[in-house]
Image (cartoon, grey):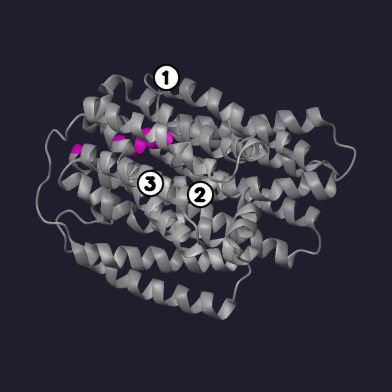
Amino acid sequence: MTVLDSTLVNVALPVFASELGVSDSASVWIVTIYQLAITMLLLPLSAVGDLYSYRRNFLCGVVIFTLSSLGCAMAQSFPAFIIARAFQGIGAAGVMSVNIALTRLIYPRQFLARGLALNAMVIAVATAAGPTLAGIILSFASWHWLFLINIPFGFIAYFIGRAKLPANPNPGGGKFDWLSGIMNAATFGLLFYAFGNLSRKGDTATSVILLAVGLLIGVFYIRRQFNRKKPMLPVDLFRNPLYSMSIITSVCSFIAQNLAMISLPFLFLSALGYSEIATGLLMTPWSIATVIVSPLAGRFVERHNPGLTAAVGMGVYMSGMILLGLLPESGVSVGAIVWRMALCGIGFGLFQTPNNVVMVIATPTERTGSAGGMQSTARLVGQTFGATVVTLIFALAPRPGISVHICLGLAAALAAVAGILSLFRGANIRRHHSSL
């Protein structure tokens, strides 16, 4: 539900604007405040999980998310709604910050890849299902039910989690670094808001100023992390080439994913002349293929090199990008689009789970929370940067058809970078299995 709510409300923004009496541009804050809260708190809450309890983080996150969902549904004014959405983002960050760490605790060593594959599959399903589910709900009920549906699932997750989730085997203890937490929130909050403002074609001067301030705070934040025993921003883990390359490949892959996912609808709608409904259906094979392949990839890497598997996945994804980019701007059949979209989904499914496995292999058990939080942050960084790049390309290119092909070409190039890095990881990965 926390991932689903990242995309669920996008479809309903015009409804929110009308019902709450605000402009369309103001309604975008409903999405922005949720994403900002998650981004600003992922690493601090991951650090809390490492110090004390992943289980407690998860349960507190579920409670906050569930109660704030009720707050969103009951909000009578736009400010109250925004406050409830901010708390919803805080709860979502509590859950997302420890999901990989809990997966590592729950699954036996030999089956860890299956757990990570399930996690990747859930993210893919929730991301893809958001717009469709929102459309169904709004067809039969008011917008309040977009949030009320979270409540029963929240209760179920809380009580099952309280009964079944394991405690940290060796909690790190110590004191939480509040100054690092504030600097982390300021750095990521300012940077993400600036990038988001650019992608929404907001005031450029304001965006540049916020970007500069965020980068300045970020420099001091990173310098502080080098003097910490267990840094919030895991600079200690970045000294391990396997881990650092896993994060870089993850950022590259999610930039490549968003470049395609945001630009392709313009190709289908504007250039090829498909309707909105047909465009939505044409995007579906990607998600379906990812859902099918992710668990298979999880089982495959239990016996085969995950680094090399991730490299193959990026190679397949790159092929899909190139083949989509070679489509003509007219006379394209549905079948020609469907199998190319499925190929992209297969490639991404083959990459995502093995990449997460490599990251976990390279991480000490007591630092899994920070590693997982960094992985989620890398996903958000890639998605945000990808959206900004698409906006800039569409602003500079003469027409949508050319813009889409530029985006697809750039996505293929980034996939090639991720694939090459994965090959380097695969060559030296076996000696790291003992740290799993």
Q: Amino acid at mark 2?
A: Cys
Please report contact status of discs 3 and 1: CB closer than 8 Å, yes or no: no
Residue 274 x, y percent position in the rendering: 83, 41
Return the mark for residue 335.
none
- Residue beneath disc 2: 252
- Region rendered in magenta: 354-365
Of the numbered discs 2 and 3, the one sitting upstream in the chain is 3
Q: Nearest to the eye among marks 2 and 3: give it.
A: 3
For the question of whether residue 39 can be seen, the reply is: yes
Tell me where residue 268 sits by quadrant.
Answer: top right
What residue is drawn where x is 85% and y is 32%?
A: 333
Residues at badges 2 and 1 in contact (C-beta under 8 Å)?
no
**Reading the chain from its start, which is encountered first: label 2 or label 1?**
2
Q: Which residue is mark 3?
A: 92
Q: Name the quadrant of the C terminus.
A: top left
Residue 63 x %, y %: 31, 42
Q: Quadrant of residue 280?
A: top right
Residue 363 in the magenta stretch? The answer is: yes
